[in-house]
Image (cartoon, rainbow, N blue to C red):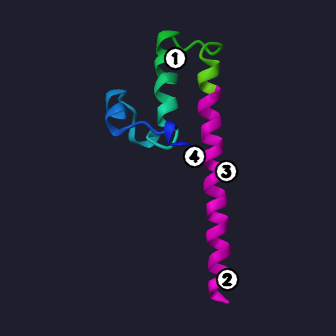
Amino acid sequence: MAHSTIASQEEMKNAKLPLGWRDQCSALLIPLNVCRKDKNYLPWECEHEKHAYEKCQYDDYVRRMKLLSQQKRQAMEDSE
């Protein structure tokens, strides 16, 4: 995961992101929320920002699942 997708604690605090949304993709969520607010939450607006954020979320999920798989495999090898 690229570090450019992680906002600093100060940026997240200023953007008033809830704690549950302060993750690997927080730097992409901040401009998405700004765009949504500016465009009155119209569903056809902010598509590029939404796509970038959802792609980041998916990539983070895949990364975590690969890590979990490696950990399980390592635990199986250690127990043998």
Distance CA(mark 2)–CA(mark 1): 48 Å
**Mark 1: amino acid:** Arg
Q: Is mark 4 on a helix, strand or loop?
A: loop
Image marks 2 and 1: residues in contact by CB distance under 8 Å:
no
Q: Which residue is drawn at 65% across and 44% down?
A: 59
The residue that mark 3 highlights is 62
**Mark 3: amino acid:** Val
Q: Position of residue 18 (x, y in %)?
A: 39, 36
Q: Position of residue 58 (x, y in %)?
A: 65, 42
Q: Position of residue 15 (x, y in %)?
A: 37, 27
The residue that mark 4 highlights is 1
Distance CA(mark 2)–CA(mark 4): 27 Å
Q: Residue at x 52, y 9 (%)?
A: 39
In this view, the residue in front, 17 or 71, is: 71
The residue that mark 2 highlights is 77
Which mark identifies residue 47? none
Distance CA(mark 1)–CA(mark 3): 27 Å
Q: Give the range drawn in magenta.
A: 51-80
Image marks 2 and 3: residues in contact by CB distance under 8 Å:
no
Main SS, magenta region, reads helix
The answer to which of marks 4 and 3 sits earlier in the sequence is 4
Q: Classify mark 4: residues with Cα within 10 Å, few (<14), some (14-19) or many (20+).
A: few
In this view, the residue in front, 37 or 31, is: 31
How many circles with numbers are drawn on the protein? 4
The residue that mark 1 highlights is 36
Q: Which of marks 1 and 3 is in front?
A: 3
Q: Is mark 3 on a helix, strand or loop?
A: helix
